[in-house]
Amino acid sequence: MKRKYIYPLLVLVVTIGFYYIEEQIDTSGSKNISNDVDNNEFGFFYLPSSTTGVVVSHRNYSFSYSEKHEQPEWVAYELKKEHLSKNEFKRPYFEIDKKVKSSSADWRNYKNSGYDKGHLCPAGDRKFSYDAFEETFLTSNISPQNHEFNAGIWNRLEQKTRYWASRYNGVYVVTGGVLTKDLKTIGYEAVSVPNYFYKVILDNSSENPKIIAFLIPNKDTDKPLEDFIVTTDSIEKLTGIDFFSKLKDDTENRLEGSSNKNGWKL
């Protein structure tokens, strides 16, 4: 083969090689990893099912992204007792999540919308390092929330979750908005505004695991948290998501079918 043909061929081979490597890197963040229990150190053995097939893992939480609604249908993470910290960090700007292949919604959709950029994995749960704190400021981790709801009962539930993490030496948390048809939208990318938000919490620290689940309207309320306790099964029916399927069947059925608050210090 003549030399003048060899060099262009080598350039082509190298270019294709780099393209393949980049594709592998890009897709590694958005593949369905629900069964990858060794994905990281934060208890992702308990990842729920995904109705979208787009499960993304960061170091400190995972989520299932809904392109239709431009937000996660759930965010899941483990909150250990040793994660709790009073560190105070400067709040970073929200950034688009590059691990979402279709691109997560731009934060500008929320500007002048009347809704907060509501964290799902709270920044307050990830104060043990700045990197973990900063990671919560991705637009794949937020949903439009009524300000009074976000600053009120939702904040109370987040604080209560941290209390339980301290008391029970860690809990598993799954949270999100209930994404249904015909929701109001905001911004140029039509980000859906959920009418309800849920939080499902598993304490698996003993031989007798327990679950508590909340379903709360996205509006201001002065009602106590216990008024919003529901069964996990009822949230599964609303969302189509299967929570904690890795538990033994009899344990899962018993826990998810109960709204018993016994054992949870409210």
Image (spheres, helix red, strand yellow):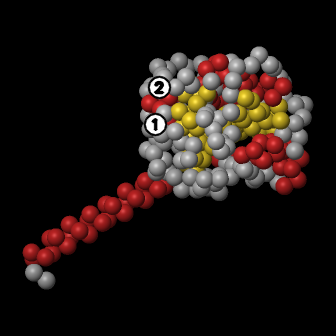
Q: Quadrant of the C terminus?
A: top right
Q: Is residue 131 visible?
A: no
215 displayed left or right of 69: right
Q: Quadrant of the N terminus?
A: bottom left
How packed mark 1 is, by other alpha carbons closer than 10 Å (few <14, some 14-19, many 20 or more), is few
Residue 252: numbered disc: none
Taking the spot 33% from the left edge, 61% from the top edge, the residue there is 19
- Identity, as a three-letter code, of the amino acid under mark 2: Lys
Where residue 69 appears, as percent x and y from the top left, is: 57, 43
Q: Is residue 207 above or below residue 218?
A: below
Where residue 188 appears, as percent x and y from the top left, is: 46, 36
Q: Is residue 54 visible?
A: yes
How packed mark 2 is, by other alpha carbons closer than 10 Å (few <14, some 14-19, many 20 or more), is few
Based on the displayed image, in which of its 4 quarters is residue 172 positioned?
top right
Q: Which structural element holds mark 2?
A: loop
Where residue 223 appears, as percent x and y from the top left, is: 80, 19
Taking the spot 61% from the left edge, 20% from the top edge, the residue there is 147
Name the residue carrying label 2. 111
> Foreground mark, 2 or 1?
1
Name the residue carrying label 1. 188
| Marks 2/1: CA–CA distance | 11 Å
Front-lying residue, 258 or 125: 258
Q: Is residue 38 above or below residue 207?
A: below
Taking the spot 9% from the left edge, 75% from the top edge, the residue there is 4
